[in-house]
Image (cartoon, helix red, strand yellow):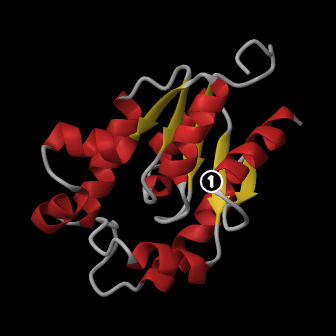
Amino acid sequence: MLDQPDFPNTISLIGMPGAGKSTVGVILAKLTGLRFVDTDIEIQQAHSATLQELLEEAGYLHLRDIEEQVVLATDLHRAVISTGGSVVYGNSAMSRLQQAGPVVYLRCALEQLQHRVASAPNRGIASRLGQSFADIYAERTPLYAQYADVTVDASLGTADQVAAAILAALKK
């Protein structure tokens, strides 16, 4: 892939928790020969805490700030970047991702996301107290669409098929 002159050196994945950004990102990195960077893991390693612990200690706005700082500090060159679901609240972070290469929105139906997230309830989703998952979905979906260069339906098929669909869309 990297030997194709027009193929991007950086691909950023955005979308709701449960859309498959981390899973698809690893596969996409293998297919393209790019490094894989998961900003949620970068946050956890930098702070020696899970996202849920950070939320409980400092609140969702602080977690969003940390996420933006991680994106601004991370080497994006020659990488597939799996972002946290709330990255779209950070204008500076999104601007940096857009400048680095295409931003791919992994779109998925609310019902499927709820099913996927239910298997891991303490994911550390940055949201206001009392905000439902459906509320978060309604709030973020327009932001994902706004920032996306490419949108791929992440609810159809396996992670391998979603990664293949991303490659096909990027080659156009």
Q: Is residue 3 left or right of residue 146?
A: right
Residue drawn where x is 80% and y is 16% of the image: 4
Q: Where is 149 relative to 50, above or below?
A: above
Residue 30 in view in this figure: yes
Residue projecting furthest to the right: 172
- Expressed as whole percent of the image width and height from the top left, the position of residue 70 reads 33, 38
Q: Mark 1 highlights which residue?
A: 159
- Expressed as whole percent of the image width and height from the top left, the position of residue 12 reads 57, 40
Residue 110 quadrant: bottom right
Q: Is residue 119 left or right of residue 16?
A: left
Amino acid carrying label 1: it is: Ala
- Expressed as whole percent of the image width and height from the top left, the position of residue 118 reads 40, 79
The quadrant the C terminus occupies is top right
Residue drawn where x is 43% and y is 59% of the image: 86
99, 51: nearer the viewer: 51
Q: Is residue 131 left or right of residue 87?
A: left
142, 41: nearer the viewer: 41
Q: Where is 3 relative to 69, above or below?
A: above
Q: Is residue 163 left or right of residue 81?
A: right
The quadrant the N terminus occupies is top right
38, 14: nearer the viewer: 38
